[in-house]
């Protein structure tokens, strides 16, 4: 059974594992804790049978705009609605907090993620050349809430 809940510090090791297995960039544990500090109720994890299998987190850019900083689901758990549930709860929290705009960056070559966001109302507003460490470009995608 899947459960979406707020991140707690004891989840850090599991979130790092999800990140390492799912994303190509490496992130410092301190970054995750700083993001949680900035917007604690919007740092969410997905648990299946008591194990963290995904997470989403973000932080405010302004009083009205929030950025999805990181979003990952373990490869073996993709396509099962976990990402959709995490995103839906993140959006619910963002709306409740009064954010009117959501923003994110996503690799231009990550077609699955780009389509995921498009289906939820995001639009590409800009391309960032060489945004990622390996030189990949990113789309900046924005959604009005």
Image (tube, grey):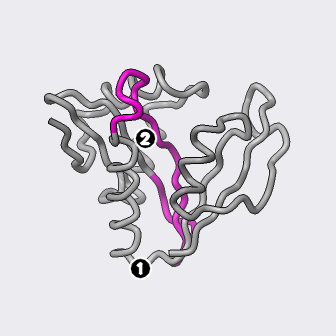
| Residue at x 67% of width, y 62% of height | 123
Question: x%, y% of residue 93?
Answer: 34, 66
| Residue at x 38% of width, y 49% of height | 84
Question: x%, y% of residue 102?
Answer: 54, 65
Q: Residues within 10 Å of mark 1 (few under 14, many from 20)?
A: few
User: Horizontal placement of 14 versus 60: left or right?
Assistant: left
**Residue 52 in the image: above or below residue 37:** above
In terms of secondary structure, where does tag 1 sit? loop
Question: x%, y% of residue 138?
Answer: 74, 44
In terms of secondary structure, where does tag 2 sit? helix
Question: x%, y% of residue 91?
Answer: 40, 64
- The CA distance from mark 1 to mark 2 is 23 Å
Q: Classify residue 17 by image quadrant.
A: top left
User: Horizontal placement of 11 versus 100: left or right?
Assistant: left
Q: Residues within 10 Å of mark 2 (few under 14, many from 20)?
A: many
The mark that comes first in sequence, 1 or 2, is: 2
- Towards the viewer: 69 or 85: 85
Which label was assigned to residue 98? 1
| Residue at x 50% of width, y 43% of height | 70
User: Horizontal placement of 129 versus 1: left or right?
Assistant: right
Q: Is residue 71 magenta?
A: yes
| Residue at x 58% of width, y 38% of height | 112
User: Horizontal placement of 53 versus 125: left or right?
Assistant: left
- Towards the viewer: 116 or 92: 116
The answer to whether marks 1 and 2 mark residues whose Cβ atoms lie closer than 8 Å is no
Q: Nearer the viewer, mark 1 or mark 2?
A: 1
Q: Is residue 21 magenta?
A: no
Q: Which residues are magenta?
A: 58-80
Which label was assigned to residue 32? 2
**Residue 115 in the image: above or below residue 61:** above
């Amino acid at each position: 059974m899947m459960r979406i809940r707020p991140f707690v510090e004891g989840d850090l090791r599991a979130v790092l594992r999800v990140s390492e297995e799912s994303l190509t960039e490496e992130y410092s544990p301190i970054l995750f804790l700083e993001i949680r500090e900035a917007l604690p109720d919007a740092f969410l994890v997905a648990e299946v049978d008591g194990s963290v299998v995904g997470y989403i987190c973000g932080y405010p850019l302004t009083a009205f705009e929030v950025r999805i900083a990181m979003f990952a689901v373990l490869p073996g758990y993709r396509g099962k609605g976990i990402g959709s549930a995490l995103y839906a709860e993140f959006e619910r929290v963002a709306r409740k907090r009064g954010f009117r705009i959501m923003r994110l960056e996503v690799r231009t070559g990550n077609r699955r993620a780009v389509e995921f966001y498009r289906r939820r109302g995001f639009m590409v507003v800009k391309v960032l050349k060489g945004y990622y460490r390996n030189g990949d470009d990113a789309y900046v995608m924005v959604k009005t809430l």
